[in-house]
Image: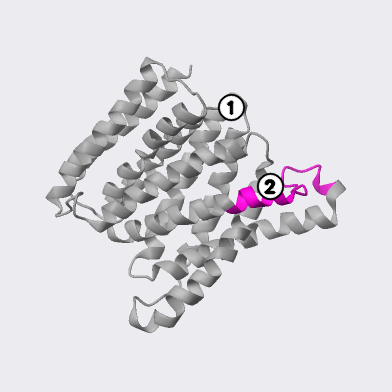
Amino acid sequence: MWLYLSFLSALFLGFYEIAKKASLGGNAVIPVLFLNTVFGSLIFLPPVLLSWLCPEWMQQTPLYVPPASAQVHLLIFIKSLIVLSSWIFNYFATKHLPLTLAGPIKATQPVAVLLGALLIFGERLNLFQWLGVLMAILSFFLLSLTGKKEGIRFAHNKWILFLVLSVLTGAASGLYDKYLMRSMDVMTVQSWFNFYQFAVMLPVLMILWFPLRKHTTPFRWTWYIPLISIFLAIGDYVYFSALTDADSMISIVSMIRRSNVVVIFLAGAWIYREKNLKSKAFDLLLVLLGMLFLYWGTK
């Protein structure tokens, strides 16, 4: 079941990336990210309040948020810091890079997760799974060649650097998720994680962006902004549910979630009319073949 939940999570992550790209076009990054944390918190506020006011009734539903110790809150707060770091790098990179280039690069994140899973959780991959990882690495190299055609040199482009930093911090978050979900409730992690992100982003907004708002890219409202939070909330809930399965492997779950690149690529091609689609499609095919090998390796 955890495999199917991982693929479902990937679908909603694809919608999330499209909404994020649409929200960031010609827009200020920090307030968009801040509003993402606002709407994410609003989504989970009713379950938390109802769990406190009507615990017996809420315990009969999958939305119950049980009480948590101070240690649990500290661990979730640490997760919020890791994820926000990844998001800040990713939001800036998404704004300035083509979807058809950024998507496949982000899809190589499970390679970093794999290395961590091997070292920390003792996970071991078979031949099919290793083939999948090697294809992901090869796709990253080919994407660097494609990027040169669009004047994007990976070694000298700061937005590529931001994307790589997003991949590394995102991988750290994935490994940390596996650790958390061994003993924590899904709704506890997801709800308080959103609240703590809002608490961190509010001073960031007021200190780093608000005083300089008239001298930087202006903020404009778009209805794509709340869609970011909605799609992410659904995708993350399914993802955390997959990790609660004792048989789940974070290296495989992470790779499957990156199949959202299919949705991202189609949006880049049809909505944004991006360039060099043939070479990028071949790179994408390698990523997808890697996903298939990883899937076959779990059967």
Kindly check if marks 1 and 2 are in contact, taking CB atoms under 8 A apart as contact. Answer: no
Count residues near mark 1 (Cα–Cα under 10 Å), then give few for <14, some for 14-19, many for 20+: few
Q: Amino acid at mark 2?
A: Val
Badge 2 element: helix
> Which corner quadrant of the image does residue 259 belong to?
top left
- Of 224 and 63, nearer the camera is 63
- Of 94 and 173, nearer the camera is 173
Q: Which residue is mark 1?
A: 1
Give me the residue at 62% from left, 48% from top.
75
Give me the residue at 17% from left, 51% from top.
153
Quadrant of the drawing holding the N terminus:
top right
Query: Where is 186 relative to 51, above or below?
Result: above
- Of 157 and 221, nearer the camera is 157
Give me the residue at 14% from left, 55% from top.
151
Where's residue 102, x and y in %? 30, 49
Query: Where is 254 relative to 206, above or below?
Result: above
Q: Amino acid at mark 1?
A: Met
Whether residue 264 is visible to the viewer of this picture, yes or no, is yes
Give me the residue at 56% from left, 59% from top.
197
Badge 1 element: loop
